[in-house]
Image (cartoon, rainbow, N blue to C red):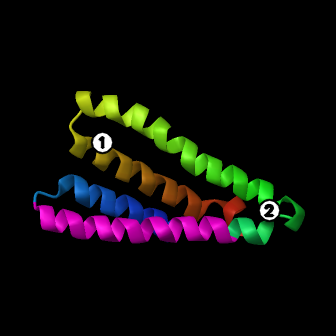
Amino acid sequence: MAVGLFAFGSFAIGMGFSKNFIFYLGLMVCYGVALTMVQTAITTMLQEKTDTSMQGRVFGLLGTMYAGFLPIGMAMFGPLADILPLQWIMIGSGIALIVIAGIAYYSRELKTI
């Protein structure tokens, strides 16, 4: 999961610095692969650690979170893009994802899961 988050953040930073559209699209493809890595790791971890009788509820909540945070992100980052350049937002988001990857990698609680 930490590797996927690190890649996710790195590609976001790369897209923020990109001046060539073709290069940007290539990074976007890799960004999608990194996103899939993170989502697969989270789903697998939840399947392994959640009691069978609770899995429907947990995955229902996960699906609700995926669907619910999309409009929240648009409501937050849309007006923010009117204030800050989009490149800065992408670079800042990438840095935040790399920090989260470091926390996930060094977290003792996540290693025991």
Q: Which residue is mark 1?
A: 89
Task: Identify the residue at horizontal 61%, vertical 47% (top origin).
Answer: 65
Label 1 is placed on what type of residue?
Ile
For the C terminus, which image quadrant? bottom right
Which is more toward the observer, 68 or 99? 68
Task: Identify the residue at horizontal 14%, vertical 67% (top origin).
Answer: 22
Say what secondary structure mark 1 lies in: helix
Q: Which mark is residue 55?
A: 2
Q: Residues within 10 Å of mark 2 (few under 14, many from 20)?
A: some
Q: Position of residue 5 (x, y in %)?
A: 47, 62
Q: Which mark is residue 25?
A: none
Depicted 81 relative to depicted 34: above or below: above
Q: Which residues are magenta?
A: 20-44
Q: Residues within 10 Å of mark 1 (few under 14, many from 20)?
A: some
- Asked if residue 25 lies in the magenta stretch, the reply is yes
Which is more toward the observer, 13 or 42? 42
- Asked if residue 57 lies in the magenta stretch, the reply is no
Mark nearer the N terminus (2 vs 1): 2
Say what secondary structure mark 2 lies in: helix
Q: Position of residue 74 (x, y in %)?
A: 40, 38
Q: Position of residue 93 (x, y in %)?
A: 37, 47
